[in-house]
Image: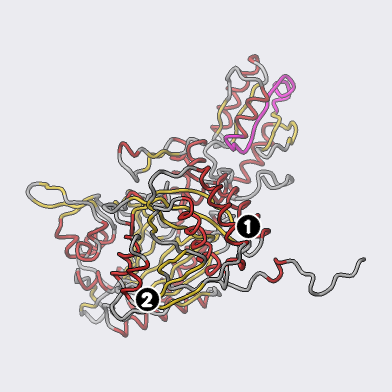
Amino acid sequence: MPYTPAWAHTMEAVMPKYDLDTIRHSAAHVMAEAMLELFPDAKLGIGPAIEDGFYYDFDLPRSLTEEDLDDILERMKESIKARQDFQREEVSRDRARELLSDQPYKLELLRDLPEDAPISIYRHGDFVDLCRGPHVSNTGDLRWDSVALQSIAGAYWRGDEKRPMLQRIYGTIWHSKRELREHLARLEELAKRDHRWLGRDLDLFSLHEEAGAGLVYWHPKGGRIRTIIEDYWRQKHFQGGYDIVYSPHIGRSWLWEKSGHLGFYSDSMYAPMDIDGQDYYLKPMNCPFHIMMYRSRTRSYRDLPLRWAELGTVYRYERSGVLHGLLRVRGFTQDDAHIICTPDQIEDEILGVLRFSLAMWNAMGFADVAAYLSTRPEKAVGEPARWDQATVSLRRALEEEGMAYEVDEGGGAFYGPKIDLKIRDALGREWQMTTIQFDFNEPERFDMVYVGDDGKEHRPYMVHRALLGSMERFFGLLIEHYGGAFPLWMAPVQAVIIPITDRHHAYGRELEENLREAGLRVELDDSNDRMNAKIRTAQLNKVPYMLVIGDRELEDEAVSVRLRSGEDLGAMPVNVFLAKASDIVARRDNYRLWDDASQA
């Protein structure tokens, strides 16, 4: 083996001299420099580092095209190879105005800085920007072969729909070319799993902006999956000692004033509607309705704990710019629950909620769950002793369950501490889903009481719990986690029967009826397509099983079974297939379609 001197390492080995945020913010400046070379009249917005990359906003004389990105990237690479120094300079406000006199957006940012704030600019080459930094020492500290420009989007200046629409260029840069390659490959896989496209291709749901932005239309196949999940959700809640309740979609303004939503949450609520001279609001939350149910009669300590759960559809205003498929919508069904109990019961109830949440996530195919504990902020309602007891209860539940957790000191809501559970999907992304939240605000506002064993009135504890978060957002996550290839127990169509010729259609119809009666969700493809085309269609639709039937299968009362992965299991008696499939469904196996086959 030839000798390699110690110094002869690749640049990849020595590159992590700067953290990625510093590298990415520096790359944003290099991109802005390139834009001013191409568009001397360009007006600069902001250019921060973001997760996995950076962006910069520009006000330009024309709309950019994808072809422009190639020219911008080439100029960026020239700047990187030129090894231009980044130079920081603290300047007076007047000097900053002079340097940025032709940049109105920068001047606005300058005006908004506090009078006593230090003002710094960064230069490299002929480019000057208002910036706090930090940056790399010179452009050569960036790797020219580890940067890529990805997309162009519109963005309102400072996120305000009433301000100018700017053009935003997204880019990414990494420590090495290898890391860039891996990131781009991951993005390609993300694009394949994007729930918006899979939802369309698999005919699961649709969105119709012309009929109302941010509102979801569940198609039959998506509705089937939702029903399966909701039925399982209800079953587990009943087994866990919960009761299911239903509440209205609207309520009088008094209710939302009393709950505090109109004071704290009005920007996210829709405008009121006049009914019989009274203002009514679409509900953004379910909790005030559950409290009204609690107050419908006198409650005793013997009645507690109460565990009330609801799949309640709520409506919240989101700006059109942040709407995103199923992940950010304006109308969604929250899998909500409220636990109302005595102080003595709270620790057992919190532990029960935590275990219930973990069991549900495991059943849905998510085993990687992380916990975060948020504690009392400076401004909080409720007695400090209650906060202390609630926080101890949350902490003990996590520790008794053996869960590692991070503490966000002072990160609780003003009305109570909480546990957040974040799950990691098949692509390694973390999603905030379950929240277990104490509430000392609503019980006080609504004067919730129970009669204790001493005959006196006492204030109950109330815990909000959203488990899956919302059916819409969870479904978007579920689609991307499984790439649309749902586990057998969730799949809207579990098997497609594929007759080889027309003379096998009668057997196909009989088979369809028998399997459906046995509990499987099956369809018969009696189209005029050839067998291979039918198989290909079923695979594209990610149907778990293809049951091919021809003369031999007709004679033997059998089916030839293929998996959506393409694996051919061969012919077998119908009752053998049915027993195998039914067993996998009953076990709710999230990863296998056949016990002696590779993962599907």
Position of residue 557 relative to residue 322, above or below, is above
Question: For the point 59% across and 72% down, which residue is it?
Answer: 18
- Near-viewer residue (284 or 512): 284
Residue 195 bears which disc, if any? none
For badge 1, the amino acid type reads: Leu
- Residue 286 among magenta residues: no
Position of residue 429 relative to residue 518, above or below, is below
Image coordinates of residue 333 in percent, x first then y, are: 36, 50
Question: For the point 48% across and 50% down, which residue is it?
Answer: 38
Q: Measure how far apart labels 1 and 2 are at the Cα level.
A: 34 Å
For badge 2, the amino acid type reads: Ile
Decide which of tag 1 and tag 2 comes sooner along the chain: 2
Q: Residue furthest top?
A: 503
In this view of the protein, can residue 246 be seen by the observer? no
In this view of the protein, can residue 19 be seen by the observer? yes
Image coordinates of residue 143 in percent, x first then y, are: 63, 62
Position of residue 563 relative to residue 1, above or below, is above
- Near-viewer residue (424 or 161): 161
Question: For the point 51% across and 67% down, which residue is it?
Answer: 124
Q: How crowded is the residue under tag 1: few (<14 C-alpha within 10 Å), some, or many (20+)? A: some
Helix, strand, or loop for circle 1?
A: helix
What residue does disc 1 label?
180
What colour-coding does the image apply?
Answer: secondary structure
What residue does disc 2 label?
119
Figure disc tally: 2
- Near-viewer residue (92 or 594): 92
Q: Residue furthest bottom?
A: 385
The stretch of residues the image draws in magenta is 540-558
